[in-house]
Image (cartoon, helix red, strand yellow):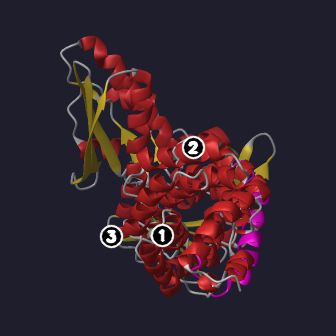
Amino acid sequence: MSEALASVEFGRFRILPHRREVLADGRPIELGGRAFDVLMTLIEANGAVVSKDELISRVWPGRIIEEGNLRAQIRTVRIALADQDLIRTVAGRGYQFTGEVRTRSRSGQGATEQEVTGATPAVTAISQPPLAPRLSIVVLPFINLSDDREQQYFADGITEDLTTDLSRLADMLVISRNTAFTYRNRPADTKQIGRELGVRYVLEGSVQRSGNRVRVSVQLIDAETDAHLWAQRLDSDAGDLFVVQNEITSRIAVALDLELVGAEAARPAVRPDALDYILRGRALYLGRVPTRQIYSEQITLYERALALDPASEKAQSFLAAQLAARVLEQMTDSADADIARAEGLADRALAAFPGKPLPHYAKGQVLRAQQRYEEAIAEYETVVAFNRNWVHAIAALGYCKFATGSLDEAIPAQERAIRLSPRDPQIWLCYFWIGQAHLLQSRVDEAILWFERAHTANPDQPFPHAYLAAAYALKGESGRAAAELAEARGLSSDDRYSSIARLRAVGTFGGSKIRALFEAIYFIGLREAGMPEE
């Protein structure tokens, strides 16, 4: 290319393509990489209308994305430019940039300027490739290491299922299977693949079957540095291969989501945008049991994201979900205010993005915190229908079924959540909810086992101790029951364990059917453990 753009100017804005930066009155403005590419593509069209399909193919080459992603980026550009008229929607055709543009082209060490009024001048294409999106990945065809070449279909099934499951995760851009399969039987130069496909991460894997055992190995590679970031090996009985395939791909997808969020949050950002703050907020959760401090830091980061992008589905939804979550875990001194704010944010996100799962999850969290379990079930079911591996939605759905009297559905839901994410920081809740289901069905020994697991996974939570107090008392072990009740009182942030009356007033015990079981079993155990009536 003989010339390269030094700058593009319109109104009070100046774009520096070589730095992928937009200035307003000389100051940088927040504009993510995708939004920048959309803006430059429209400017380069020289005033012509650019179809939605062409924009998607230019900005997301080789990827499967929803049209809603494009609309979101258009909205981001309009908000950043503070001028809705600069990008015009042409019904049934696409979008058009309407600004009057000046370009400065650099040729050697000199620079020339071209100015045209009333029309958009020809703009030289950007010479450097666009930066890879933050959560972008290609799943390369898994290699079949089995002696039986016919097992290749199983390896291909793992590849296809992983591609599908990853594409359902928040913010994830995944190369289509058709493009990924063109790399079959080619040397895996991950840096080259990253450049060719415009992705930051490459997932490689292999499948080996020997007799009745199947082993799947995967490794995540940073396409920019060729560094191996994460690896996992899963072994399973062959049995029903379709079931095995589903189980393995689900577990890998859940683990990968956490790894990718952590990797992206760790990347330095000179001028963080809304997504940077969201990723950092999500990463705070990784590998750590939530505390008051963690919730506070997460909420601060989501507030910053919302300030940068008030219309962001993710900023609104994640903020609403975490405000509700800290109420559910009794880690706030402003429960009423948190719920009111969360409800407003969730409703706003749902109204703007009714087809997205994240606002439904946020709404489910709010409804659960309000003890509106029947309504919460519908929201969580919507989430799981979109993403079968959404661990926290699966667990919360199971609890809501329990709270409305469907005891038979409570334990399987928690067991699935545990299988999908065995190292999840919130796994104590799954253990605890399984314990509750056993206790209310008078399986006291099984209940104690699960409450002990919950306590071990999160020693700072008072709930497992209170239930252990009731369970041990029902077994006649009064000493242990009294000790557990004392632990619960010491860890509780309020005086809920001071009396039965107080616990009834502030506790959550589900609908009438379940509440009757709590009265007949849990409260009797607490009385025997030494809790007074008033």
What percent of the width, then of the height, locates residue 386?
62, 42
What percent of the width, then of the height, locates residue 106?
40, 65
316 or 369, nearer to the observer: 369
Q: Amino acid at mark 2?
A: Asn
Asked if residue 88 is positioned above or below residue 467 in the image, the reply reads above
Q: Main secondary structure of the magenta part?
A: helix
User: Circle 1 sits on which residue?
Assistant: 276
In the picture, measured across the screen, residue 95 lies left or right of residue 179, that is right
Q: Is residue 13 visible?
A: no
Give residue 498's quadrant in the image: bottom right
Sequence-wise, the earlier of marks 2 and 3 is: 3
341 or 459, nearer to the observer: 459
Under tag 1, what secondary structure? helix
Sequence-wise, the earlier of marks 2 and 1 is: 1
Dots 2 and 1: beta carbons under 8 Å? Answer: no
Which of discs 2 and 3 lies nearer the camera? The answer is 2
Asked if residue 200 is positioned above or below residue 369 in the image, the reply reads above
Q: Amino acid at mark 3?
A: Gln
Quadrant in which the C terminus is drawn: bottom right
Sequence-wise, the earlier of marks 1 and 3 is: 3
User: Circle 3 sits on which residue?
Assistant: 109
Is residue 340 within the magenta segment?
Answer: yes
What distance separates the C-alpha of mark 2 from that of mark 1? 23 Å
Query: For the magenta stretch, what is the residue range?
Result: 329-355
What distance separates the C-alpha of mark 2 from that of mark 3? 53 Å
Asked if residue 489 is positioned above or below residue 84 in the image, the reply reads below
Q: Residue furthest front?
A: 476
Under tag 3, what secondary structure? loop
User: Circle 2 sits on which residue?
Assistant: 387
Asked if residue 40 is positioned above or below residue 320 in the image, the reply reads above
Which of discs 2 and 1 lies nearer the camera? The answer is 2
Say how many tags the image has: 3
